[in-house]
Every structure is written in structure tokens, then in C-alpha cells.
Image: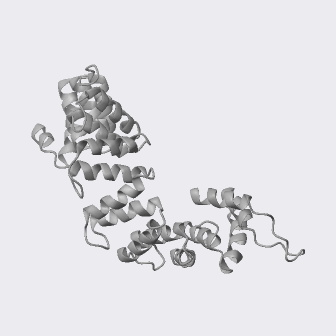
Amino acid sequence: MKHIIIILACLMTLSSPVAAQADKPQPDLQKGLTAYQAGDYATALQEFTPLAEAGDADAQFFLGGMYGMGQGVPQNYAEAVKWYRLAADQGDASAQYFLGTIYDYGGGGGVPQDYAEAMKWYRLAADQGDTNAQFNLGVMYDYGQGVLQNYAEAVKWYRLAADQGNADAQYNLGNMYEAGQGVPQDYAEAVKWFRLAANQGHVNAQYSLGNMYQYGNGIPQDYAEAVKWWRLAADQGDADAQFNLGVMYRKGQGVPQDYAEAMKWYRLAAEQGSAKAQSLLGLMYDNGKGVPQDSKEAVKWWRLAADQGKAAAQFNL
């Protein structure tokens, strides 16, 4: 989206070209972009193709995207790679990044997964400041994909992306500080990065920040703050956060004790397959807390948890 906006902004500053042939409309990148944004892929394709064939890097990039997503043309990763590569070879950072993702995950149409090739293109884009490429390059070093695992190098690239506001990179950088991977363990620094990502709505960062408040790691222990951040994550559907909220309501930590509210959150997590939530949901039914006592319902939820190997549920059954 930023790429599109930047191109449009640049094009608005350009003077209109003199028509080479009055009787034949010339391909127009801006017209293609406008059509693309309106969902008129046929017109976008008509405008982008001749420009791309003539060597226009922006048109090549957008044409690659259309083939990659099957917009106005049959989805064809090999064709997407062709156009992305042409744009990437001209130094287009966005094309380099997307080319890296295709090799990273392996596209259809005969494009094999190739971590080394993904690394090559991510690095070229990352060196130009592309934040998504920097983040993905960090992931490659973090997990040793296409390169020897190197936590310090992962931290380097995460930090570059995080400093540009990339929420995924901020969250991962927080994880590195929490675990002491590539950097000395530093809970306060982990909290800093989790908070930056959480404030952008990053669900995993919200959950992790709640954990930091629960245990008082890097900040004073504060159950009410833990509940606040878990609720934000739970409202986005995070099953672990939903389970933790259930625990807080059951115990009355950070909120008034409320078995009915505990049941609500346990159920949401349990319905997503959380074995620990299923196990405690069964216990609530067995003890009649928050709901009328119901042994059949207890057995139902314990069985689901037991089938996932939850020992407490197996014992209760």
C-alpha cells in the first residue's frame, strides 16, 4: 500500500507527457493504478503490460503482483517471479521483497522453496530500508533458514525494522530480550518492545505484555494491568489470553471474583481447542461454579482435553 501511495504522489508532481500519437492512447501507469485500486483488473493489465515490457520497473512490480494473486489473469507464480525479477534487477525494493517471499514459502507453478534465494532478495531489499524485508531477514537468522542460525544477527535486523515501527519486529525483539537470545536477558527492554507492538494492536505482544505484568518481569507485578492487556488480546480471539482471563476471574485477581465471567472466557478458549481451558471448563461444570452443576457437561469437556493428552482431564475422567 505504501508503494502505491508513493508512486501516486510522485506521479501527481509530474507534468503530463505530450502524446506521441494523437490517434492511439499511450499506456498510462497512473491510469493502471487507479483501475487496479477500483478492482478493474482488465484495464490495469492493459495499462501495465506494455509499460512492463518496455522496462518500467513500477509496472513490472504491479504486473508481478497481479500474476502472484491471480488478479485479472490466472494465478501464475512463475510469471510473477519473472516480472518481480525484472523489477528487482532494477533495484525495486518492493519487488525484491516479494520475490524473497515467493522463494521463502515456495510458490506454485514450478517455483521451488529456496531459503538461500529468499535470503538473497530479502537482503537486497533490507539494505534499502524495506522494513518487511528486514523483519523477514531477522526471522531467517532466528530460525536458521538459508543461513546458519545466528541470534545476534536476527536481533540486528529485527531492531532495524522495529525502529521503523514494524510491530512484528518489535514483538520478536521483545521475545529476544525476554529469552536472552542474541542479547543479554533484559525484561525491562522486553517490556518496552512488547508495549510498542501491543499499542499497535499486535495480539501476541498484548498477550506477552499481560504475562510480564502477571509475573512482575521488568515491571512491578500488576494483575489489573495483566487483565487489561489479556482482554485486548482475548477480544482479538487469542485463546491463551481468553484462558488467562478465565483464571483471573475464577481467582479474583485484578478483577472481582466472578465464576460466570470465568466460564465465559474458558468456553471461548475451549471452543478454539485449548486443552487447558477444556479441562477447567469441565471442572467448573463438575463443581457447579458459574453454571448449574452438570456432570455430563464436565465429562464432555474433560474428554476433549483428555484426547489432547491433558493429564488432569484424564485423571478426572
When asked about the image quadrant of residue 67, the answer is bottom right
- Residue at image coords 28%, 45%: 189
Measured from the top left, where is residue 90 in percent x and y? Answer: 57, 76
State which quarter of the image contains the N terminus.
Answer: bottom right
Residue at 25% across / 66% down in the picture? Answer: 150
Q: How many marks?
A: 0
Q: Nearer the viewer, residue 203 or 92?
A: 92
Q: Residue 181: name its quadrant.
A: bottom left
Residue 32 image position (x, y, % from top left): 71, 65
Q: Quadrant of the C terminus?
A: top left
Residue at horizontal 31 percent and vertical 36 percent from the top: 242
In this rendering, would 307 be left or right of 46?
left
Q: Nearer the viewer, residue 68 or 2?
A: 2
Q: Nearer the viewer, residue 263 or 145?
A: 145
In the depicted structure, whether residue 139 falls above or below residue 63: above
In the image, farthest residue toward the right:
23
Residue 240 at x, y = what percent? 29, 41
Residue 171's x, y, as percent? 35, 49
